[in-house]
Amino acid sequence: MEAKAKYVGLITAAILLSTFMSAIEGTVISTAMPTIIGSLHGIKLMSWVFSIYMLMTAVATPIYGKLSDLIGRKPAMLSGLIIFLIGSMMSGVSDSMGTLIFWRAIQGIGAGGIMPVAFTILADLYPIEKRASIMGLNSTAWGVASMVGPLVGGYLVQNLSWHWVFFINLPIGIITIAILIFFYKDTFEKRQAIIDYPGVLWMSVFIVGLLLGLQMISEANWLLMVIFFVASVLGLVLFIKRERKAPEPLIDLKMFKSVDFTAANTIAGLTAGFIIAYNIYLPTWMQALGGMKPSVAGFVVTPSSVVWMFGAVIAGRVLAKHSAQYLFKFSLFVGMLYAIMLAVMPGDAPFVLFLATGLIFGLTMGSTITASTVMAQQTVEPSQIGMATSFNNLARAMVQTMMTTVYGVVLNVSMSIALQSHHNLHFAELNQLIDPNTAKNLPASHIAPLRDIMTFGLHNIYWVGALLMLGAVLTNVWATRQLKK
């Protein structure tokens, strides 16, 4: 414990770096995505670049969480970092949409070992009363990444190539690995490493089947949709059956007997489902509807990321005096109103309006996600913190994975329906509209109707996000009533 305390500041810095690496990966790719689509002609596969990453993150997260409780935080974290960097490097040399999606899957596997283990290490380093504030400090990495990412990403896209946006992870990851190797030492009691392989298999069947089933909806392949959904349900049933009798379950189902644990993770998942719509499709809105360059459009999410830390600090102070349900009562309601606002906002709304309202969004979402993580950790034994933290991350990743696919379906279906009343327009023109570099080649008479079609699709995405936030509000109402009994 003394060795750990001696280097606590340096180790925390390494955690900040790993968080920054994960954060800048998202902001840079979101900024570069319209250019990638224009280059590889893959608007229909756009959601897969994000969803395959989150799919593999979802599959890997509980595995790394369990490993961190069994073999140690350090080896689990290092393996995740190394795999993530390999995926980043190979994504950077991809020359087709299929290749990019494959290496994004590898990158996602590594990511599954970064964020959950990072939060577990912070839980080891700091007591509960300081944990929310430290997580708020950790969230500053998102704010810095949100400012640096779009600027760097936009510069690389405009002056070099979108391939280069993946390489920025390499120096950050190498520095983080070096700090952890030389200065971080596990101090927990190791146990025999029994991996629940059947649990991993059935959980993977559940997640993959669900995602592929959703994707088949967008392709109108109803037979495969039914097959994948049936496989997903079967995987879930067999996973639950396995976990009830596994000697070292991947996810201990007894944790769900706690109303706090169940509510915290449900709220975290639903909220994360809306956040991913904000992060992915708001830059797309700025470029397709506002005609902005990638280097400028990406900054639309910067205010929310910058104030995320302050939301986390607010969560820490509120949790010191009140229950998490008290905090959620306000933050979730404001989040729901924000989703509705995006669903009705005109496509040509001023950029400054998105920046101003993003401050409110960041404060509410920062407090909500931080409170859900601390709440989930508080409800379990110290020997299960890794598992609980990984499940909290899994809940968010699962819903984000599913919703990324759902949003892609909603966007494609909405645009296809809207196109039916414009016989002179073609779906391929929407590929051009989304990238300002190719939009200038469109006929002037096509720009306005194409933007109306895109607006219709984006509005429908945020209506779905509003439904998710309503679900989170109702979950908190249920938990509050249950805890009063």
Image: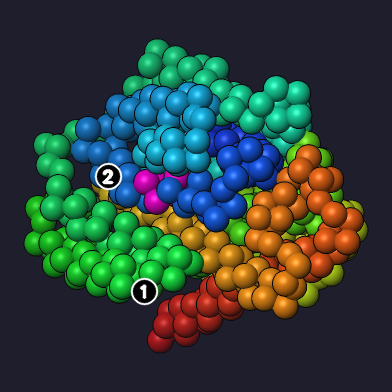
Residue type highlighted by circle 2: Ile
Helix, strand or loop at mark 2: helix
Residue at the image point whose x is 75% and y is 23% from the top: 159
306, 52: nearer the viewer: 52
| Label 2 Cα crowd, 10 Å radius (few <14 / some 14-19 / many 20+) | many
Residue 398 placement, left or right of 417 = left
The stretch in magenta equals: 53-57
Helix, strand or loop at mark 1: helix
478, 246: nearer the viewer: 246
Q: Is residue 111 magenta?
A: no
288, 8: nearer the viewer: 288
Residue type highlighted by circle 1: Trp
Nearer the N terminus, badge 2 or badge 1?
2
Residue 249 position (above or below residue 171): below
Residue 354 can be seen, yes or no:
no
Q: How is the image coloured?
A: rainbow
Where residue 347 appears, x then y in whole percent? 82, 65
Where residue 306 appears, x then y in whole percent? 73, 44
Where residue 275 appears, x then y in whole percent? 60, 58
| Label 1 Cα crowd, 10 Å radius (few <14 / some 14-19 / many 20+) | few
Residue at the image point whose x is 60% and y is 45% from the top: 41
Q: Nearer the viewer, mark 2 or mark 1?
A: 1
Q: Which mark is residue 63?
A: 2
275, 135: nearer the viewer: 275
Residue at the image point whose x is 36% and y is 39% from the top: 109
Q: Which mark is residue 299?
A: none
Q: Quadrant of the C terminus?
A: bottom left
Q: State the predominant SS element of the stretch in magenta.
A: helix
Label 1 belongs to which residue? 222
Furthest residue toward front: 424
Contact (Cβ within 8 Å) of mark 2 with mark 1: no
Where residue 113 appears, x then y in whole percent? 37, 38
